[in-house]
Image: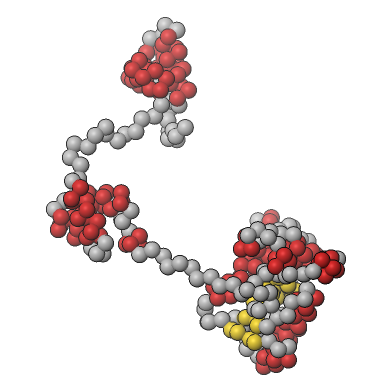
Amino acid sequence: MNVHKNARLTPHGREWIVRLHQSGQTPKAISQAIGVCPRTVRKWLERYRLGGLAGLTERTSRPHRLYRPTPTPIVERIAALRRQRVTGKQIAAEVGVSPATVSRVLRRLGLNKLTMLDPAPPVQRYQREHPGELIHLDIKKLGRIDGIGHRITGDRRGQSNRRARAQGLGWEFVHVCIDDASRIAFSRVMKDEKKHSATAFLKAAIAYYASLAIKVERVMTDNGSCYRSRAFAKTCKRLGLRHIRTKPYTPKTNGKAERFIQTALREWAYAIAYTHSDRRTEALPRWLHRYNWHRPHSSLNNQTPISRAGLAEDNLLKAHI
C-alpha cells in the first residue's frame, strides 16, 4: 500500500465509507463520522459504483494519453546530440523544443547525467595464485580503554577533561598481516608502530605461516617510517623476502589489508563491550582462529581461508589443535 503520510483515508477506510452508505447513511452523515468533506465521500462512492472494490485503490496521476508526445525523430536527435556531450539548453535551442522537454526525454533515456555516457572503468583486481607468494602488512592504531566507552554508551562526559589533564590512556597498535592468495590472516597488538615492533611482527608472521607449511616470498607494505627503516630491510633480506611498497596515497593497492582491518574492527575490536584493553587483546587470537578456520570468505567463493592452504589431513588436524 503506497499512501502518502497525510492521507485521511486508506483503502480500508474507503471500504468503510461504502459499507456505511450501504447501511443507509447519507454522504453528509458519513463525512461527519469519517472526518472528511461530503465531496470526498461522494467521490469514493462514485468510484465504487464504476469499478467495485478495485476502484477504491490508488490511481496514477498520469494522463491516459499524451495529446502532443515528442516525435520519435526529435527524441533520436536529442539522444544523438547528448552523446556528443551537448548540454540540455544547447540541445533545446538546436532542436527547437523547450529545455523541460529535453530534460524529460534525457531522463527517460537515462542520459540526463554526463557520467552516464562514460561507463565506469572495470575495477582491476589482482590475486596471487599460491599461498605465500605475497603477504600484506599494515597497522591500525586503537585507543586504550579501561571501561566501556562512548561508542556503546554514547556518553562522552569527562573525556575532554581527562585528556586535558594528560591522563589519557594512550594508544596501542594492531599489526595485521594477510596472505594475498588464501586470505589467511595473522595479527598482534604491539606497543608502538616503530621499526623494532614492525620487524618483530614480521618475524612472528613468517613463523606463523611456516607452521601452516606456507613459505612467504614477498611482503607488501605502505610507506610508513617503520617499513622504510634499515632494520626492516635487513630483516626482509635475512628472511629471503622481496619487499614491495605501495604507491603513495593509494590505499587500494594494499586493499586486502585495509579490508581485513575493517572486518577486524567490526567483528573483534568493536564487537562487544570490553571493560579493558587487555580483555580486547585476549580476544584477538580467538577471533583470528574463527576468521581463518571457520568464517566463510566471499572472495573465496564462501570457503574458509585455511581451505586454500593445501594442508594434508595430518597437518590440518595438528595446526587446528
Q: Residue lying furthest top in this view? A: 24
Q: Using the rendered view, name the quadrant where residue 314 is placed.
A: bottom right
Q: Position of residue 53 (x, y in %)?
A: 42, 20
Q: Position of residue 128 (x, y in %)?
A: 61, 74
Q: Residue at x 61, y 70 (%)?
A: 256
Q: Is residue 64 above or below residue 119?
A: above
Q: Is residue 131 above or below residue 157?
A: below
Closer to the camera in the image, 228 or 85: 85
Q: Residue at x 67, y 93 (%)?
A: 230
Left or right of residue 309, residue 24 in this image: left
Q: Is residue 90 visible?
A: yes
Q: Residue at x 63, y 86 (%)?
A: 243
Closer to the camera in the image, 291 or 72: 72
Q: Using the rendered view, name the quadrant where residue 144 is placed.
A: bottom right
Closer to the camera in the image, 125 or 271: 125
- Location of the C terminus by quadrant is bottom right
How many tags in the picture?
Answer: 0
- Colouring mode (rainbow / by chain / secondary structure / one colour): secondary structure
Q: Position of residue 108 (x, y in %)?
A: 30, 49
Q: Residue at x 19, y 58 (%)?
A: 91
Q: Position of residue 19 (x, y in %)?
A: 45, 13
Left or right of residue 38, residue 234 in this image: right
Left or right of residue 149, residue 35 in this image: left
Q: Is residue 34 visible?
A: no
